[in-house]
Structures are given as structure tokens and as C-alpha cells.
Amino acid sequence: MEHKTADHHFLPRSSDCEKSDNNTDDHSRSGTTASHVTPLSKPEVHENLADALTSPRDHGAKSRTVLDLDVDPVRLRRLQWKIDLHILPFLMFGLLLNFMDKALYNYAQVMGFIADLHLKGNDISNAASAFYLAVLVAVIPTVYCLQRFPTAVWLALSLFCWGICVACHAAIQDYTGLVVVRVLSGISEAAVPSCLMLLTGQFYTRKEQPVRFSIWYCGMGLGQIFGGLISWGSQHIPADSPLASWRIMFLAVGIFTSLIGVAVFFLVPSTPMQAWFLGEDEKILLLLHIRENQTPISETDTQFQPRQILEALTDLHVWLPWLVVVLHLSGAATISTFSSMLIRGFGFDAKTATLLNMPSGLVNMISTLFSGMGATLFGQRWAWATFASVVSILGASLLAFLPHSNQAGLVASIYLVNAISGATPLVMQWLVGNTAGHTKRAFTSASLSAAFALGSFIGPQTFRAADAPGYQPAKVASVVLWSVATVLVILLMICCRTVNAIRDRKAEGNDAERTPQAENDFVRLTDKQNPNFRYQY
């Protein structure tokens, strides 16, 4: 038997033709999928598909026919590989370059940067904080821009402008110039993490997102490694070079960043419907697959809804992971800004300190992938985030309390604190994946950029010139901040479990609330409004 729509032909499950309406609820709730999606008779079908999935009540039989289709797991695996190869490398490059800027700022401090710009006292910390203050302020218009403009286009523009700002570091002559360029860099960068998170949510289900978040978050570790290599190579530039080595370093990375921005503009799609590397059948297969997220595709929901922002501002499921990210980043200044100075303070010269800092990036990547894969394969992301945090707390404790004579132990502690990178992306995905409603998702994604900025603004301020060269208060602060963050992760897990149990009881006791999930897929409801939404933890 064949179902027809105005635009195309579909084949439903052969055994369920007469029972599709009755079984929609059980099938969607169980999360199971079946055999196949047939080729489509017209290539233009995807243009209206997302809208049909978004408003099933408005599209009647057409939408229900679409929702009754089966997904072939073999084709789905091939599709996921295809998306991974075309999307993830650009997302990883985005975060790599995002962190590379901080890594260069870190490494430049042992390359004559401080003396050339006549910096003194807390100038390094204040300039670092100015960068994140600019990010924090720029997050406000970012929420609106992410709602109104294609995500990939905004990412490309941000990377291009940000690359220009990084290159401009080569021209600065004093502290004032440094602050101006850091502020402009912060404004340009503000939208990058939000864009990466939103793009991941557009192409993957909530179950698939943790490992993808972790893969592109490895860009931070790669940034540490490549930043170290670039710094080490730049330190071999002859002293009589027209430009100082650190200036050449910023100039080269800035130009490369702008080129990546151009590539993103032409090669990265904002939604599955715009994916140039997918055929028409593959786009529909992907839309059917990600409908379980119960969130709309960006281009089908561009109306700005202030009520969803108000809901986010009063939602404990937003505030708890947001605070965790702030605490993680506040304690991570030992990684992003001052690790080279700390290692040099252990008694090593500049070149050796640069080389010894590079393995931190490898630890960062291992921790990130280990936690992400563990959460994807076994669930319980709260437990994996807690484990990574405990390892980091151990490293921070060793860094704070080992004797100065124990060089090997102190360097090892620098490596261990990088394990916090395994917890942060899990918490970020926890927030984004547990948020529905497009305005609310845009707001929470942008709020994570604000959390990054606020935490990174606070972190450098714990490193005061008066505490040099040991910076003991900053080290102890990392221990305390990460310990509090770990407690909040456990509290967030309890909140998610409690809300899910309440919704399960209501669904069992009231048939009226057991709305077929097919009717809720892609509807413009927030996670609080949708009774079928279950929080992952």
C-alpha cells in the first residue's frame, strides 16, 4: 500500500499500515527505529519538510505520513560518517583557533612580549580580563544575531574579523594598544563557542552530541600543542629580524584564522536542508533521525520570543550548568594564561618551559575524548564529568602544596589540571541538549559564551603580581572552585532525575498528557512546556 502526498511518494512500514496512528506513541517513546526510507520522487521535497515536521497539526496527513517513515540504520551510519567528515573538522578548527589566541598570549609572555610593550605589575592579568569582559558584553547582541542570521554565516564572519584582530597584535607598541586589540578580539570571538554548540545540535541527536562536543573540544588541546610548536619555532627567529618573534607568531595565526573564516562561509551549512554534501533522501533521513531532539530546525523558527528568555533566566536547569562552567573556567587560568610562567618559575628557561607545556594539550585531548566517549557509550555524563573534575582537583592540590624542589611533580601537576577539559564540554552539552525552544536555545548557547567570559575574567585576577612567582592563592583557588563545581554537577543530576520521575508519574496517571511524541516533535515548545521532554544526565 502506498501513501501519497502532494509533493512526493513514501512507503510506510508494511506491517503497520493500518496501525500507524495507534502505535505512534509507543514507537516514539521507546526510541526504536526500523527498516528504510524510500527514494523520493521530487528533489524539492526537503524545502517544505522541516516546516511540516515543525507544525504537524497545521500540515495534517502530510506530516503524519512523514513521521510514520522508518529509518534504515545502515544508511544512517553512513550518513553520520558523512556529516562527521564535513562538519566536525571545521568545528574543531573553530575551537582550536579560539584557544590558539589564548595560547599565543600565554607563550608570548616568555618571548619578550612583556619587555617590548613595557608591561608591569598586573598589566598582563588586566589585559587578559579586558578580553573576556569584551566577550561578556558582546554576548548580549549575540543572542539576537544567532536568532536572526544563519549560524554558519555568523561563525564565518566572526572568524574572519577575529583573525584580523589577532594579526593586529603584531602592530601594538604599549599597554594601551594591547588592551584595545584584546577588547576587539573579544568582541569578534564572542559568538564562536555558541555557533559551534548550535551547529552540533542541528546535525546530531542528544545522545550523539556528547562525543561530538568532545571531538571538536579537542581543538583546545590541539591549540595548546600547535601554539607551543609555533612559539618554540618562533623563538628560533634571529634576533635581528625586522619583527620580533612574537609579532610574527600573531601575524601568521591571524591570517590563517581569517582564511578559515572564508572556508567556513563557503563549506559549512547552517541546517541539514542547506547541506550541499547531502542528497535529498539523506536530508530527509537526517531530519527524521534528529526529530527525537524535540527542538526545531533553526530556519523554521526565527521568531524572537522574549518569554523563552525569561523562562531561561528562572530555570534551575540553566543556572546550575552555567555556574559549573563559570567555576571550571575561573580555576583554569593555570591552563590558559599562566602555565608557561608557572613552569618557568619552576626553574626552566623560556624554550624548555614552552616544550614542557605542550603535553598539557595531549592530556586535554585524552581527557576530553575519554569523558565524551564514556558518556556516549555508557550514559551517566554526570559521573564522567565528576571523575574528570576529581583528577583536576588532585592536580591542583599537588600544584599548590608540593615543595618547590620537586620539579617533576610540579610539572606533572600542570598536566593533571588539564583533565578539567574532560568535564567542561559534557556540562556544556548537558545545558544545550536539555534546552528546547529556539530562542531559549540561542540564549543558553550564548550564555555559555558569557560563562566562559566571566570565568576567564575572574581566573586571571587570582594571579596577582604581589604573589609572584609562586602564586599560591591562585593555586588554592583552583582547588576550591573545582570542588564546588563538582558538588553542583551532582546536584544538577539529582534535579534532572527528580523532574523526569515527576513527568513519568504524570504520564502514567493521566492519559490526556500522553500526547503522541510525533505531535510534539519540532513543535515550538520549550523543555519546560513539553510534557514528553526528558532531561538527560
Image: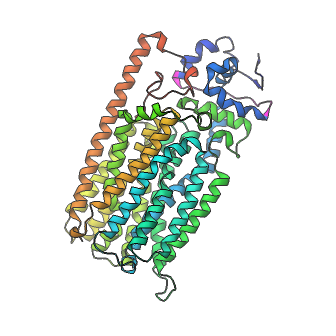
Compared across the picture, whether 422 is left or right of 411 comes to: right
Q: Nearer the viewer, residue 104 or 170?
A: 170
Compared across the picture, whether 199 is left or right of 11 comes to: left
Asked if one can make out residue 469 in the rendered structure from this viewpoint, the answer is no
* Image color mode: rainbow
Q: Does the magenta stretch include residue 352?
A: no
Picture coordinates of residue 113, whole percent (x, y): 40, 76
Compared across the picture, whether 459 is left or right of 370 comes to: left
Q: Nearer the viewer, residue 331 or 191?
A: 191
Picture coordinates of residue 140, whole percent (x, y): 45, 47
Q: Which residue is drawn at 78% across and 35% down?
A: 43
Q: How many labels does the image show?
A: 0
Compared across the picture, whether 51 is left or right of 476 comes to: right
Q: Which residue lies furthest to the bottom in this view?
A: 240
Q: Residue at x 53, y 32 (%)?
A: 293
Q: In which quarter of the image is the N terminus?
A: top right
Asked if one can make out residue 163 in the rendered structure from this viewpoint, the answer is yes
Q: Residue at x 31, y 56 (%)?
A: 458
Picture coordinates of residue 232, whole percent (x, y): 45, 75
Q: Nearer the viewer, residue 173 or 6?
A: 173
Residue segment shown in magenta: 29-42
Q: Which residue is drawn at 42% across and 44% down?
A: 447
Q: In which quarter of the image is residue 11?
A: top right
Q: Quadrant of the C terminus?
A: top left
Picture coordinates of residue 322, whole percent (x, y): 37, 43
Considering the whole magenta stretch, tell me its main secondary structure: loop
Vertical position of residue 470 compared to residue 504: above or below: below
Q: In which quarter of the image is residue 31?
A: top right
Q: Nearer the viewer, residue 534 or 241?
A: 241
Vertical position of residue 494 compared to residue 335: above or below: above
Q: Quadrant of residue 496?
A: top left
Vertical position of residue 163 compared to residue 289: above or below: below
